[in-house]
Amino acid sequence: MTPEFFINLPKVELHAHINGSISENTMAALVEQKGGVDPSWRLAFKNGESDTLESVFKMFKLIHKVTDTVEAVYKVTYDVIHEFAAENVKYLELRTTPRSEPSTGMTKLSYVESVIRAIQDCSKESLDIIVRLILAIDRRHPVSVAMETVNLAAEYREKTDGLVVGIDFSGDPNAGDGAEFIPVFEEGRRQGLKLALHLAEVPAPEETWKILQVTPDRIGHGTCLQPDTGGSKQLEDFVTRHRIPLELCLTSNIVGKTVEGYDNHHFQYWYDLGHPCVICTDDKGVFSTTLSREYSIAAETFSLSDKQMWDLSYRSIDFIFSDEHVKHMLRKKWTDSKDRLSVK
Ligand code: 6MZ
């Protein structure tokens, strides 16, 4: 399989944080508009570099200083959608944490509206991509803020006729006790929002067990669910029994050193079980990757055939937060692609 095969393969991206997905070009343009930034700021990990999760989270703080206006947030969202569309991502769920910046007048409301406007503007163009939005809860912020995010998501789902589909739970996995947010997840569910929660990105078996009881609709990372990665049989059994799909981000885990190397990635374990797995980028800008590249790395590392890669991509459609009508449309696109890709 050539790099072109992975670019031409239709794909679904379900785990992409907007501010982590900023390309080099977009970042350069934003930095120029700002009249430059401190040259010591590191705004992406180049190919092959690895560091720690701590450095990854420091990087987000700097990126947020660059995307501190509604115009920047609009541009980032608009460009990220175009970049995913250019590599044949046909369905994209973006996620982002509503943020205010008093110095520029940006409020959480104007932030969310800017993101939504960019998505709506893209949908008026002839791009072959469907985009939905997930609002993110940062676990470093208080529970009351998380509750506001749920209400904001529910409000904007109504206002946008279903463009906002769910709630994400993210932020530095080493910070705080995630179990405190359980009432927030329950409220989100009560309001009809889907739950895509970062779980077990680092070993935290007790917290993970408690949060699992809300039965998230999807799990982000799930790196430390199995006993040999710092989880437990109980966690693994729960996830398996409920067939909770895993959003797996290979390069992200390698750069953040929560996984030692590609061939140790938990993708292999869950894939071999026949468990629902979706390959995602997490932060394509920060980790200098693309979804096509992540697919290519998975194929090479785990010796998967073109048919297996096509199937993996096709099965991802089952786990999107959209209705059967959208799923049906996407499945047709995938089936039509088979001949073009010479997949038997
Ligand atoms: C946990 C992550 C993450 O929301 O400003 N984020 N949270 N684990 C990860 N693995 C590396 N990658 C990104 O995008 C940036 C924010 O997404 C979350 C963090 O809260 C980060 O500040 P937005 O668009």
Image (cartoon, grey):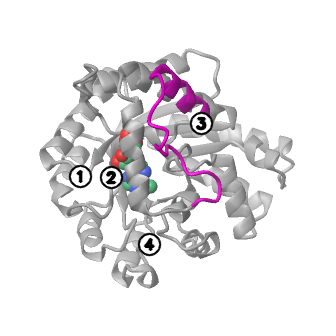
Name the residue nearer the viewer: 213 or 254. Answer: 254
Span of residues in magenta:
24-49
- Is the residue at mark 2 in contact range of ligand 1, meaning its CB lies under 8 Å from it? yes
Task: Using the image, determine if residue 265 lies above or below residue 283.
Answer: below
Q: Residue at x 33, y 52 (%)?
A: 171
Q: Quadrant of residue 341?
A: top right
Q: Is there a contact, CB below 8 Å, between mark 2 and mark 4?
A: no
Query: Cα distance, mark 2 to mark 3?
Result: 23 Å
Query: Cα distance, mark 1 to mark 3?
Result: 27 Å
Q: Is there a contact, CB below 8 Å, between mark 1 and mark 2?
A: yes
The picture places residue 16, in percent across and down from the top left corner, at: 49, 44
Q: Residue at x 75, y 48 (%)?
A: 6
Q: In the picture, which quadrant includes the C terminus? A: bottom right
Sooner in the amino-acid sequence: mark 1 or mark 4: 1
The nearer-to-camera label among 1 and 3 is: 3
**Which residue in the protein does label 2 denote?**
171
Question: Three-letter amino acid code at disc 4?
Answer: Thr
The nearer-to-camera label among 2 and 4 is: 2
Looking at the magenta stretch, what is its main secondary structure?
loop
Q: Is residue 7 magenta?
A: no
Query: Cα distance, mark 1 to mark 2?
Result: 6 Å
Name the residue nearer the viewer: 138 or 206. Answer: 138
Q: Is there a contact, CB below 8 Å, between mark 2 and mark 3?
A: no
Sooner in the amino-acid sequence: mark 2 or mark 4: 2
- Is the residue at mark 1 in contact range of ligand 1, meaning its CB lies under 8 Å from it? yes
**Which residue in the protein does label 3 denote?**
24
Asked which secondary structure carries label 1, the reply is loop
Query: Cα distance, mark 1 to mark 4?
Result: 29 Å
